[in-house]
Image: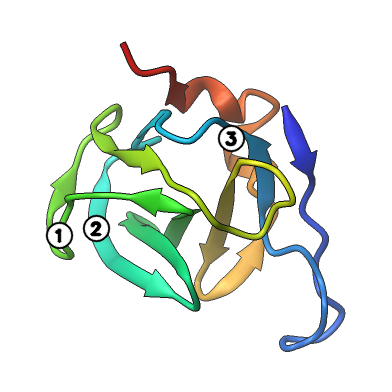
Amino acid sequence: MALWEFQAPETPWGPGRRGIALSATMGEVVRAPAVGTIAFVGTVVNRPVLSIEHPGGLRTTYEPLSSEAEAGQPVAQGDVLGVVASGGVCPTECLHVGVKLNDEYVNPRLYFGASVRVFLLTPN
């Protein structure tokens, strides 16, 4: 379930929602939606973040996501990226998913459709 939807900013640095926030529970496993290469794993502000570069100039970003992955590591569709961590931009637990195409934020629904949550799995 989405807690909020994408809302494009009017200007590059203006306010907006540059992704969607999905209801999630801390510890839920997050899997790669498609083939790519881990582009970034680290902390942004106070949140753990992971980004994947996909073919065709597409980049997906997930936060807060605790991960053992390393930048430069290839991933296949379905590979475990990590688990939902604490913190983040939501008032409750969530996973924020952002998508950039050629360095411009775009609506993740264009790529994930209505079934974004299919790559979140409850741990055993």
Mark 1–mark 2 CB contact (< 8 Å) = yes
The answer for how far apart the CA atoms under marks 1 and 2 are is 7 Å
Examine the rendered structure and indicate whether residue 109 appears above or below residue 10: above
Give coordinates of residue 30: x percent, y percent.
39, 34
Give coordinates of residue 95: x percent, y percent.
56, 44
Residue at horizontal 22 percent and vertical 55 percent from the top:
37
Residue at horizontal 54 percent and vertical 30 percent from the top:
25
Label 2 secondary element: strand
Label 2 sits on residue: 38
Residue at horizontal 43 percent and vertical 46 percent from the top:
85
Marks 1, 2: nearer the viewer: 1
Q: Which mark is residue 86?
A: none
Disc nearer the start of the sequence (1/2): 2
Q: Which mark is residue 112?
A: 3
Examine the rendered structure and indicate whether residue 78 appears above or below residue 101: above
Disc nearer the start of the sequence (3/2): 2
Amino acid tagged 2:
Ile
18 left or right, relative to 33: right
Amino acid tagged 3:
Phe
Q: Residue at the far right: name it.
A: 10
The answer for how far apart the CA atoms under marks 3 and 2 are is 19 Å
Q: Residue at the far top: name it.
A: 124
Label 1 sits on residue: 70
Amino acid tagged 1:
Glu
